[in-house]
Amino acid sequence: MKNYSHFAIKYFRQLLVFRVFVALSIIISVIQIFNLPYGSWALITAVTIMGSIPFLGGVLSKASQRISGTILGAIIGLSLFLLPASYNWLHHVILIAAVVTAIFFTQGKYSYASLVVAITIVVVAGGGPEDLHAAVWRTINVFWAAVVAICCSLFIFPARATDHYLDYTHNFIKLCCDYYHKHNQQIATGNYKPIDISPLSNILDKQTALQPHTKNENVASKQLLTEIMLTEEQIFTMLGSMLHTKWDTQLGQAKISDMPGLMEAKEQLANRFEKLAKQMEKQVILPVKRDEIKMLSILPPPEMHEQSDASDISYYGYLWLNREVARQFSLLTHLLHEYYSHVRY
């Protein structure tokens, strides 16, 4: 499965186009073979469902809302045809009232379903009380086209938002490794320059956008995926404070540079990030316990407690930031291990 994940991510756009091509080909073939009237509504349904949200989780959510919205809208729309044809004005009054009510609910949780209800009512009953034949066929075409769109999304090179989500996590970890290594080199040489970590922020933004789709794809493990991202955000916050501070101008600079074992502990942590990135490629994560990370066992020399001064503020602040990154890293390895173990079994 991991090989397919890499393939699906690499050729994401091409596979999306292929899925839509297959779905439209099937729909057009059915329309032509059975000479279905108002077949354009089937095509519109497929494009609407598959075009705007390419991920499986989004398609499932959107298709279910479209089908439920279509059913409700069709029931309301078709019920208007129960009115006598002579009450033409009443038909349109109720039509407007129903559409306005549906629009009101578009600002709620099921906004898309509410919008589909409004559209379906207009499509089904907007032609007036004499348009029953068109109303029925439009409703039928929306139903079966939605089923075709779902099947194509499920079985023809499906695009899982979760694969992209975890690929971003992989990139996040690699960047953390690079930035942390670079920072350690600057501290060691005293040649400090602020490091731009905006790419990490961009990754978190992309993962946030994918979360609604990943929750639909992974109902059982959606909490794990949320906790993974929350841990990434904590690491981003700590690294941001660490890499943007001009430590060469802080009073505790000398204490930071002279602390025994600090540089070795930091490099070990950077190497841990690198090792985790490689493990993610194989989807086999070995959880790292806190007592395995040197940064969490390193302590200031005893004499430091006897000579407190203003430099202690930045010195202990720097230690705390590094230790917090280490703690969050350990948590991240356990979360990823739990997720991949859950997926395998």
Image: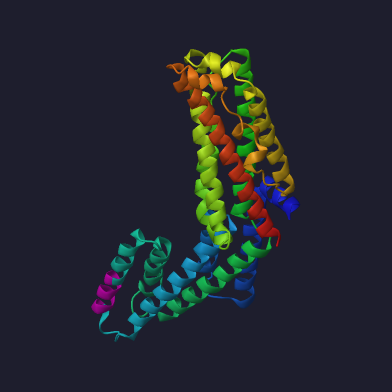
Compared to residue 120, the image places residue 319 above or below, namely above
Residue at (29% x, 68% y) in the render? 101
Between 266 and 336, the residue placed more toward the observer is 266
Q: How many marks?
A: 0
Which quadrant is the N terminus positioned in?
Answer: bottom right
Q: Nearer the viewer, residue 75 or 258?
A: 258
At x 42%, y 62%, the residue is: 112
Q: Is residue 12 above or below residue 254?
A: below
Most prominent secondary structure in the magenta stretch? Answer: helix
Q: Nearer the viewer, residue 294 or 78?
A: 294
Which residue is located at x 60 percent, y 23 percent?
A: 183
> From where the camera sits, is residue 50 visible?
no
Is residue 90 inside the magenta stretch? Answer: yes
Q: Which residues are magenta?
A: 89-97
In this view, the residue in front, 249 or 9, is 249
Q: Is residue 18 magenta?
A: no
In-image side of 319 versus 85 (left or right): right
Residue 167 at x, y percent in the picture: 64, 45
Q: Is residue 12 above or below residue 248?
A: below
Is residue 311 in view from this perspective?
A: yes
Q: Position of residue 317 (x, y in %)?
A: 48, 26
Q: Position of residue 88 (x, y in %)?
A: 27, 79
Residue 345 placed where, x, y %?
70, 62
Compared with 170, 60 (above or below) is: below
The residue that appears at 71% across and 38% down in the rendered structure is 275
